[in-house]
Image (cartoon, helix red, strand yellow):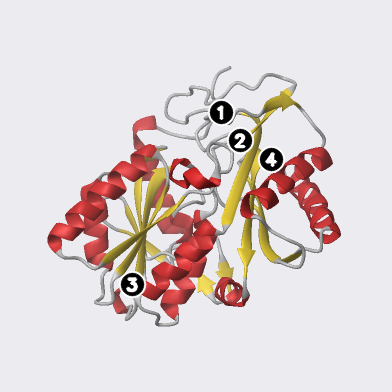
Amino acid sequence: MKMKKFINNPENLTDELLDGLAAANRDIIHRGEENMIINNALEGADRVTIVTQGGSGHEPAISGFVGEGMVDISVVGDIFAAPGPQACVDAIKLADKGKGVLYIVLNHAGNMLTGNLTMKQCKKLGLNVVKVVTQEDVSNAPRENADDRRGLVGCIPTYKIAGAAAAEGKSLEEVAAIAQRFADNMATLAVAVRGATHPSTGAALADLGEDDMEIGMGQHGEGGGGRQPMKSADETAEIMVNALLKDIGIQSGEKVMLFINGSGATTLMEQLIIYRKCEQILKEKNIEIVANYVGELLTVQEQAGFQMFMARMDDELLRLWNAPCRTPYLTKK
């Protein structure tokens, strides 16, 4: 099937989308050198600052969450590709306002290679940086092998909670510890019913056939070993929410954050039907949802499916989640 997308020269995709993002949100962000998206308020930031990185093609993630109370600089790679380490080092140097930098990296091979090389160079330069890795995909490794887990939508609430802690004036060690505590108590499981196409090449990222779905689909069409016949919304929700509860070890009486993140081509109607069932299941188990989101935060072009995200919450994490922020795609007052 011929790819139909409103694009120009495929070689200019990242450049043009970053121009568009900055132009559409010029009151919050601006575009810097080396494909950086920068918080307009960074210059006057007397606090810990936050830098992250990742490939384009997952909009609004990750650059749509640059702004006050979240990320200060996002370093953007080409479609589904990590940026180079020099750009990340330059971003960390630019971001550092004397209080240190939290560097958040999603666990994918390219991002981790860049992240490790970046940290090595930062150490040589004597920069005050702490790296936190988000690695919460339950489908491709058990919790005891967390370093093998892919980073999915969990990066977004991690940005929010870390950003709020930084805004409160906490030290770099305190901000990093809070971000790590949250990251250690979160889990995501994705499902897809149709794969996306690579917008530069038109290549299909996954072939799921007419009657199947895959629980455990990765960010770029990677399989998760959960290929099965298509199920109803309620059946799918039950499989997924129970897998997340088991992974984190959530018990009766606990409080959780729950996201249904659309992958790009799943309607809000479907996402809300899924969320409804999740709430019913959790209520029956005496588990309280204290923070939530339903909608698109991190997409995979026009992949049909969603990511279900859950995290254990406490009073401090809830306060930080609810703290003010202003970014292109998430604002809290």
Question: Dot 1: within a 10 Å radius of its alpha carbon, few (fewer than 14), some, or many (20 or more) residues?
Answer: some
Residue for point 29% across, 75% down: 43
Measured as percent of width and height from the top left, residue 329 is found at 54, 60
Q: Which residue is mark 1?
A: 223
Q: Which mark is residue 266?
A: 4
Assess whether mark 1 and mark 2 are in contact (beta carbons under 8 angstroms). yes
**Figure label count:** 4
Judge whether 92 appears above or below 242 on screen. Answer: below
Q: CA distance from mark 3 to mark 1?
A: 39 Å
Q: CA distance from mark 4 to mark 2?
A: 16 Å
Q: Which numbered disc flags the more N-terminal residue, 3 or 2?
A: 3
Assess whether mark 1 and mark 3 are in contact (beta carbons under 8 angstroms). no
* Horizontal relation, residue 13 to residue 256: left or right: left
* Horizontal relation, residue 91 to residue 205: left or right: left
Disc 4 marks which amino acid?
Thr
Q: Nearer the viewer, mark 1 or mark 4?
A: 1
Which quarter of the rendered picture does the N terminus lie within? top right
Assess whether mark 2 and mark 4 are in contact (beta carbons under 8 angstroms). no
Q: CA distance from mark 1 to mark 4?
A: 19 Å
Q: Which residue is mark 2?
A: 216
Measured as percent of width and height from the top left, residue 296 is found at 61, 50
Instruction: Say which element carries label 2.
Output: loop
Which quarter of the rendered picture does the C terminus lie within? bottom right
Q: Which residue is mark 3?
A: 42
Q: Is residue 328 visible?
A: no
Q: Nearer the viewer, residue 282 or 94?
A: 282
